[in-house]
Image: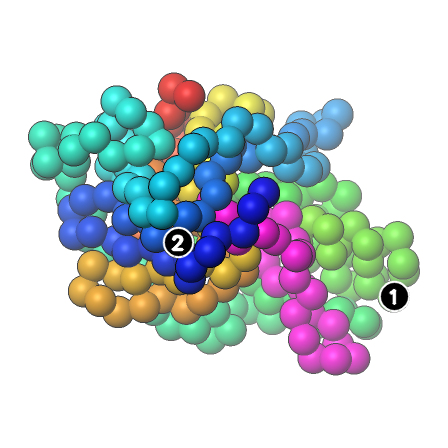
Amino acid sequence: MTQPKARAQIVVIEDGPYVVSGAVPLAQQTIIADEEGGSENWREGKAFTVSESYELCRCGHSEQKPFCDGSHAKVGFDGEETASRTLYVEQAQLFEGPEMRLTDAEGLCAFGRFCDPKGQVWNQVLETDKPAIRADFIRQVGNCPAGRLVAWDKKTGKPVEPDLPVSIGLVEDPEQRCSGPLWLRGGIEVVAADGGKYELRNRVTLCRCGESKNKPFCDGSHAAIKFRDGL
């Protein structure tokens, strides 16, 4: 993937689409399950041709998904932003382990389910003095698309984050038979409709089914309604 030339930014339009600027690469990202159905890894799929600026559907009704076609006006979409602008670390619960810490801001959950395999990350953190368990812990936490979960190195006091390219993923979840959120990767600025800015984070998921109760962020509603983008 090529890196965007300008600062990557998404502006939320009141009751309208997301306006993306910075020529941000856009591609499908599919959740790959293990033999037991647990979320194991990601596979990149179809890449879309994009311009310096483009609009992505946020109401879930566009006939040209993932791009906006004006359907939000026809369906009377209510895109009111209700998400907290409290900093991540102030939202998150802390879990201590021997070599690592885990922070968990449950309100950001996008139902990626990378937290569940191999005994769940909340238990793994308690055994991070064991190299194999620590490796699984770091990988599973880093694969959480919403950034609900963050692993921290106790020696350095710094987060252990995956090196993600600045890009947007269109999440596909075959195990749940649905399409998921917009996965913002690598630190993309999100600007609210009122001009305020949300905290810049490496991993963020934005709602694209239109049903989240935590707009503009995903709250997992796509799984409940079995949202499909038809791509």
The prevailing secondary structure element of the residues shown in magenta is loop
The Cα–Cα distance between marks 2 and 1, rounded to whole angstroms, is: 42 Å
As displayed, is residue 8 above or below residue 111? below
Residue 31 placed where, x, y %?
A: 60, 33
Identified by mark 1, the residue type is Asp
Q: Residue at x 21, y 30 (%)?
A: 69
Q: Please name whichever residue, 143 or 221, is drawn nearer the observer in this view of the structure.
A: 143
Q: Residue at x 66, y 57 (%)?
A: 163
Residue 162 placed where, x, y %?
A: 66, 56
- Is residue 159 in the magenta section? yes
Label disc, if present, on residue 129 of the rendered structure:
1
First in sequence, mark 2 or 1: give its number: 2
Residues drawn in magenta:
142-168
How is the protein colored in the picture?
rainbow
Q: Residue at x 50, y 48 (%)?
A: 167
Mark 2 nearby-residue class (10 Å; few <14, some 14–19, many ≥20): some
- Is residue 199 in the magenta section? no
Report the quarter where the C terminus lies: top left
Residue 9 lies in what quarter of the image? bottom left
Q: Is residue 68 left or right of residue 27?
A: left
- Residue 171 in sight from this viewpoint: no
Identified by mark 2, the residue type is Gly
Most distant residue in the top direction: 230
- Kindly report which numbered mark, 2 or 1, lies closer to the viewer in this rendering: 2
Report the quarter where the N terminus lies: top right
Residue 36 lies in what quarter of the image? top right
As displayed, is residue 46 above or below residue 59? above
| Label 2 residue SS | loop
Label disc, if present, on residue 22 of the rendered structure:
2
| Label 1 residue SS | loop
